[in-house]
Amino acid sequence: MSIFHALESSASALTAQRLRMDVISSNIANAQSTRATVNENGDYEPYRRKMVTMQSESTNFKSLLNRAKNSGQPGGVKVTEITEDETPFKFVYNPSHPDANENGYVQLPNVEPLKEMVDLMSATRSYEANITALNASKSMLMKALEIGK
């Protein structure tokens, strides 16, 4: 096993959390976008909330240990997919809006800013935890180098 496995694992988690924060930021930025996509009928649809799915590169500790021992590759985190949230759009009565239907209702995205902020705080905390782990690994490597002086 390489001494850099801990750094590589933390780096993969940092990359995944950064992508998660980017997707959440996109959701917040488009929380009021009523014409984000065109559906199969040719009509405009509001923005649909996106979600990041992450998974460990190994399924359990035993497989992680065997993988590291045999191939020398570390485990880590990877983004498996970015999916769209299928919850229904919100309808708000606003007859003066240019996208209002014949009854005066506007379809708004299924993005809830409060939920996005909680997800963003969670991603930020995970990012910070990985930075702490990365700094601890770096500190241990520096102490190991000092032993040889």
Image: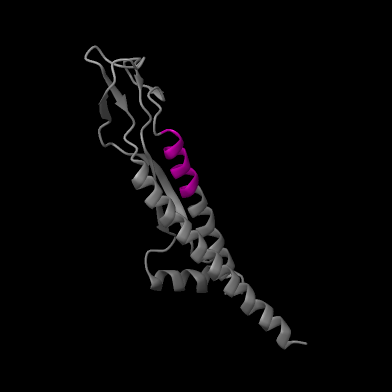
Q: Which residue of the protein is positioned furthest toward the top in this rendering? A: 102
Percent coordinates x, y for residue 24 in the rendering:
44, 44
Quadrant where the image shows the C terminus = bottom right
At 33% from the left edge and 40% from the top edge, which residue is drawn? 112
Looking at the image, the residue that sits furthest to the right is: 149
Name the foreground residue: 74 vs 8.
8
Q: Position of residue 93 (x, y in %)?
A: 25, 22
**Residue occupying image coordinates x 45% and y 72%:** 66
| Quadrant of res 49 | top left
Judge left or right: residue 141 versus residue 70. right
Q: Main secondary structure of the magenta part?
A: helix
Magenta residue span: 20-30
Q: Say whether residue 72 is visible.
A: no
Residue 22 highlighted magenta (yes or no): yes
For residue 28, side relative to residue 88 (left or right): right
Question: Which quadrant of the rendered structure holds the N terminus?
Answer: bottom right
